[in-house]
Amino acid sequence: MSMKKIFSIICLSAALFSFSACDFLGVKSESLTTLDNFFYTEGECRAATAPLYNKVWFDFNNNFSFGFMDGRANNIFAPWSDYIFPYVNLTETTSTANLYSAWQSLFVIITQSDYALNNLGRAVEHGVSKDVVNECKAECRFMRGVAYWYLAMSWGNVPIIEDPQKLIQNPKCNTNPIEDVLAFAIKDMEFAAENLPEKPANVGRVTKWSAQGMLARFYNTAAAFVRGGKGSTGSLSKTADQYYAAAKEAARIVIEESGNDLLENYEDLFKVQFNNNKEVLFALQWVPNSDYGTTNFSDSYLALSSTVVGGRSAWGNATFGSGELVKLFSDRGDLIRLKATYFTEGCYYDYIRSDEGGYLVGTGTGSYDSNGDFQLVSKDEYEEIRAWIKKGVVGCSADTDNLATNQNSCLANPLLRVADVMLHYCEACIAGGTSTTDPLAITVFNRIRARAGLAPVSEITTASLWDERRCELALEGVAWPDFVRRAYYDEAAVLDFMGKQNRNAGFTYKYDTNTFSWKTKDDGSIEKVGSKDEETPTANRLLLPYPESELIKNQLLKAAPVPYNFND
Amino acid sequence: MKIMLSTSFWRGLCAAVLLMVPVLASAQQKTVKGVVSDQNGEPVISAVVMVEGTSTATTTGVDGTYAIQASAGQTLYFNCLGYKDVRMVVGESSVINVTMSDDSSFLEEAVAIGYATIKKRDLTGSVSSVGTDAISKTIATSADQVLQGRAAGVQMTQNSGMPGGGTSIRIRGVNSIHSSNEPMIVIDGVFINAQTGSSTENALSSINPNDIETMDVLKDASATAIYGIKGANGVIIITTKRGKAGSVNVNFDAQTGIQTMPKYLELMDLPMFAEHYNTFAELRSAPKRDEYAVPEALPAGTDWQRELFKPAAMQQYNLSVSGGNEKATYALSAGYLDQDGIAYGSGFDRMTVRANVDVQARSWLKLGASLDATRSNQNFNALAGNEEGLIQVALKQSPAVAARSIDGGYDGPEDANFAQSNPIGLANLLENHNKKGGVRSNIYAEVEFLKGLKFRTEYANDINLTNVYNFVPTYKFGAIYHSENSRSEQKSFGEFWAWRNLLTYNKEIGQHNFNIMLGQEMTSSHWEYILAKRLNGPDNLHDIGAGDQTTSTTNGESGNEKFSSFFGRIFYSFKDRYLLTATLRRDGSSNFSPANRWGWFPSAAFAWRISDEPFIKDNVEAISNLKLRLGYGKVGNSSIPSMAWQATLATVTTNWGNGYLTARIPNEGLAWEKTDSYNLGIDLGLWKDRVNLTVDAYVKHTKGLLMEAVLPAYVGTAGQGAASAPWGNIGELSNKGIEFTLNTVNINKRDFSWSSNLVFSLNKNRVEGLNVEDAVIDRTYQVSGTNTVVTRTKVGSSVGDFYGYKVIGRIKDANDIYDKQGNIKVALPTTTINPNTGVWVGDWLYEDVTPDGVIDENDRVNLGSPLPLFTGGIGNTFTWKNFDLNVYFTYSYGNKVMNWLRVTMDNPNTTYNKFRRAGDYARIELINPKGSDTDIYNVYVASAGKWMPRMSAGDVNDNDRISSLYIEDGSYLRLQNISLTYRLPYKLTEKMKISSARISLNIQNLFTLTRYSGYDPEIGMTMDQYSTGGQNALMNGIDTGRYPSPRIYTLGLNIGF
């Protein structure tokens, strides 16, 4: 072979070698958006806040929202479901089911709100209008505020996180005291109230009125906290009366100025067709036909049988209404709300399993004929008749305009609605006293009662408000915070009340056609089915323990909380 | 009969080689006769005698004699494995006696070392090789099965016994926590990402094992450094068969077999189940069932195991043709495998076609190409592994439910709550399968433009398509009603290409021998997938288009990964005794930011052939080979998601269009994970290699372990909607071990020979560091909807250790709880002592680790490691006349298994079906029959099975919590393979005009000696629950109902023309 040939081959190899040195390694993803390419338009800003209405709430909504938030208030009993009964029985530990996933979910809401909030500034640089950016920032702060309020209600002292990326470098941190957590939530919500629009960019997004309603709730919480004299950091700087006044004003704004109002028919609030109705101030926005994570498992967890949801998943056969609350409804004659809250034996629903004529609890699907006899179409399967959960159970797909699919009820479950704000108005009017006759309070209180088929009253007392809230808002995730709020200034009363609640996930009762009776043993004590013992209510049990794996990763959680540095 | 003293490991194969040669006797020639003997005068049996340039050939008989037709001037060619070839020209004489001298062919074997092959004698690194011999002795449906127990340092675990199912391959231990632990597999120059770990995916299942010439496992870094980019987990180089110059070989291989269930678990029959049901219902005041009123009178009920598991057929055919001349060689083959699964609704079939050609176009130019096409179909309806897996469903289903209902449909439970579905119905009605197709190709040109100086350029390409189909119809099994049908299809496409250019130079200067290689390589991988889903529509039409359009959901993604590399290797030997290999590689990976893209990976190894030193060679005759090897190398790993260093956003569906959340916290500083590895090895051959021993000891230390930071949940990196934790170079891991391979020829007589091989691999794994000193990585699994921690990984222990409570005994009476003063003396979860609402006689006692007198989650401890202390194989081959008997065992020692099935199946407090032993739950009886049954001092445990607590309605003690009770010894010794082969005598095959014929009988997985109580102690990786995705190194050895490996009986026929 000639030298020329050799030379040309060497040249060729050299060329090949150098070829691979160019920018061969720079690859670009066609699937993932990078932060560099984002926050250029108003649409992108709104797209960054849209998931804060569903996916980030998924783990919280899945069962902690009722398992703890209502279970702890003794609105549910479920002798076999370990994501409920430890909370009812006050026996949860650092590794109880869903303690960790709820904690995790609330912090996902917070940190994703933080990321969006901290990145939205880029949009201003990219020429998006400041108003739009502020609206979006307000949505982030709304979500973060709500999540912190839930954390304060559940765990008390928790870390306040504004820059999670910084924390990742050194994740060990102290908690901040409840007082600062509440103050932080209030600051977020005040910003939201100032910057959110009166009309939302899309149906279902939060408005100025949502934030005002939430503020009524937060101010009442702060008032109760200050009233109990438990604060030490001074971050809740106003007096209890000032907070009550602020709550009253925020609630008044919603009642009188928002245009949001009570829905006429209570039962309609929990139908998919009425998602985001005029009473709703803040609801989670689950997506039809979407993937795990943006779906609402409400009736998968709660429905008593697959018959009631037309063959979709139903794991709620042993998740019941607590005897104590069913008895309260029954004693009050509060049957409209009872029917919307629990499935009790003999109750007939024409809008559930409408495809087979309706649903008769304890029997199955079918309808009444002209003789008044129930014509059964398919028999129901049930264990033993008690009251099962109705709120959150939407029926079969025909009952939901074909929106509900397996493991997705599509119910935009409200986390705040006008009735709640109205009752907060009443609470703010009672303030440090024991009753109120404030005209607006009496008006809204009686409107709520009228819708529930109850007679009007002329005075609202702490006790009547307490019962009204329990019946109106049962199974909507706010029952336990009512206990916590009251315990801030009257711990003994709350513990005493809890002690008398027949608070065991195994107590059985019978409720049929308006008669309630506990099932008792020969000695007169209430019969208990295979459940574990309940603990006596103590102040400790007003808060949850930190999840075990968090304690392992950060022992500082056990240390005394450190006041938060509000630097603005 | 004389006894042969000379040895050869390979001699027995001589006949087989001969039989490849077509025999045509030529007339008009004289008969040449003679005796072929070795240096010691012993006859050489079955040596091939061939008239060169013709197809005339014969073999020597048992006395070494031969007779062949040849004419003067022709050359006789004598060939026998284990001896050096001899050529003799036929002269006047018609008697030619030949003496053949030994050839240490064992050491002359070519071993692939990455971009080249090297003779075993010159090897400086640690490499295990498995050849065609082992493959033909295994009824392997997939190449990975051949490696099990045959290569020291390789731990091969089948993750599932399902046809086409996955395997975990670990080379020298677990090297990574979050990224893949699978070695890189190089098939004819194509890099395969060996995600073999999931139960339905197996990268190696696309290769026909019969096409494989050798599998070389590069273990230490001095060997793998040449694959710096992905060498961290070891490298397996698979070389497929190529043609050889000579006559045309045609080979046909057929196997047919039957697979059976090797073991059934003992479950309750209907009378036992009903009895238990009644007692449990009474205890918790639940309604009883009338039909169970007289349990003894009931029939045995449905045996769900025998409904689900059935004997299954398998068949396999291969046809290959190879041949060529000095100018061109070729090999063609086609293979077909059809394997039904022993569990209903599973199966695998595969068709492969392969062709390759090598052409010596000019004296200085060689060209070649190969093409390999595969299609396969896998049904995985009987997918095992979680609560929905049909194996668990079948085991837990009540024997009262029939498999079929009277109307010919599928039966189901009367009450849908807490009930199991009908596994047979699901297996039949559901559609779960994947179809794959792939084409692997390779083309090269090699130019030798000076003697010793070669340039080679090579392009390799791999294209594969995977389609996964899923269909769930509407159905009604008793009270179980599924009202909504759903259909989904996932289609993925992957393409890989590599282009490499190598310049090699060989030079011998006196006693110095150099081989220098310079190389450049660029590789690119691209994958993409789309998913479509619809609900509703007719049950008989499964396509997406038949579903309701308004319920459509779709998804799609793609990704890229590229590498660019430059490398050099120098091999230097002095006097053939002192050998040095040094490599240096520089790799760039697209997975890192531009600043951290490139890494250097050096290695060096030194070997000393002591046996060639005069002081051994001349003095110690027994030692035929002694080599000392010493190596060091650094290898890298970049197996992370390709965009991990960047700030990315995740798409979330919302009612207002796409929403975006922060997907991952970026880390621009992310860089190569690097493993330093040290190896010390000795190769010893005794008595002309009649005994061959290779021992290696190694230390591997991985620094900058690529993993996602372990963070507390409050930083928002876990759960739905979370921004994933950043990847970082965080942890540190070490693996230390020792391994050896011993091959011996124990008896080598004329008609009978016996050889053995023993493989032993010991590895110790330790987590040396994580991002936070007290970080722990927990893995959970669900028990009836609740996540429970099953493994915990932390610094100081090995990866994925089991974690839970330690059972220290069972409360047999009041004295186990109370001391003499009546105070509780043991730690309990509660201080309530009560049969219904507290702890009671018959409950387990747990160790109070803290010790604070209370059993709570702080009392959980490390319950042992799923990683074995050592593993290996023992093989024995016996040859008697035309019979070959191969008996091959594999073993594993010291690994623990978490028998997850027992958590529910041994639990007396459920209405599911259970193991028969659960009927022996602790029976509580009264000391004074007239006394109270709620007085702790009046009750005691009268009888109880070893693993059983009492029956209780509330189970306040949580007797089924994850504890040492469920951790079992997973050590085993398995008769993996036993095969008997008969070679038809040459005289017979000659008449049949074929060159060889073999009939073999093979039994795989005949028996397993183990103390493990489940189906099979070989568990492998469990996939994360509710995912069919890849393996998880932290979920090892958890038996959630693993698909049992079948026992396979096969009859095989091999014919060569």
Image (cartoon, coloured by chain):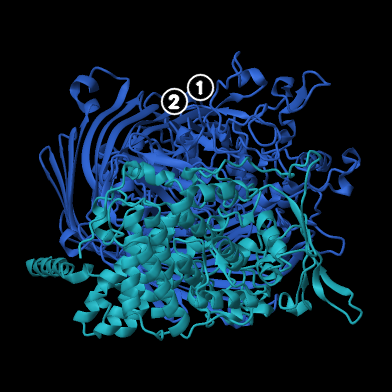
Chain colours: A cyan, B blue
Q: Secondary structure at mark 1?
A: loop
In screen coordinates, is A173 left or right of B245? left
Q: Which residue is mark 1?
A: B2
Name the quarter where the C terminus of chain B is drawn: bottom right
Q: Is residue B173 visible?
A: no
In screen coordinates, is B57 left or right of B709? right
Q: Chain of mark 1?
A: B
Q: Position of residue A15 (x, y in %)?
A: 13, 70
Amino acid of disc 2:
Glu
Instruction: Answer few, some or many: residues within 10 Å of disc 2's Cα (few below 14, many 20 plus, some between 14 and 19).
Output: some
Residue at x 33% of width, y 72% of height:
A190
Quadrant of the image occupied by residue B1012: top right
Q: Is residue B288 visible?
A: yes
Looking at the image, do the residues carrying marks 1 and 2 touch, with CB atoms under 8 Å apart? yes
Nearer the observer, A163 or B554: A163
Nearer the observer, A70 or A460: A460
Instruction: Answer few, some or many: residues within 10 Å of disc 1's Cα (few below 14, many 20 plus, some between 14 and 19).
Output: few
Q: Chain of mark 2?
A: B
Q: Earlier in the sequence, mark 1 or mark 2?
A: 1
Circle number at residue B42: 2
Above or below — where is B799 with respect to B935?
A: below
Q: Position of residue B291 (x, y in %)?
A: 88, 48
Q: CA distance from mark 1 to mark 2?
A: 7 Å
Amino acid of disc 1:
Lys
Residue at x 22% of width, y 67% of height:
A25
Q: Position of residue B828 (x, y in %)?
A: 56, 29
Name the quarter where the N terminus of chain B is drawn: top right
Above or below — where is A18 with respect to B151?
A: below
Q: Position of residue B157 (x, y in %)?
A: 49, 43
Q: Secondary structure at mark 2?
A: loop
Residue at x 63% of width, y 41% of height:
A532
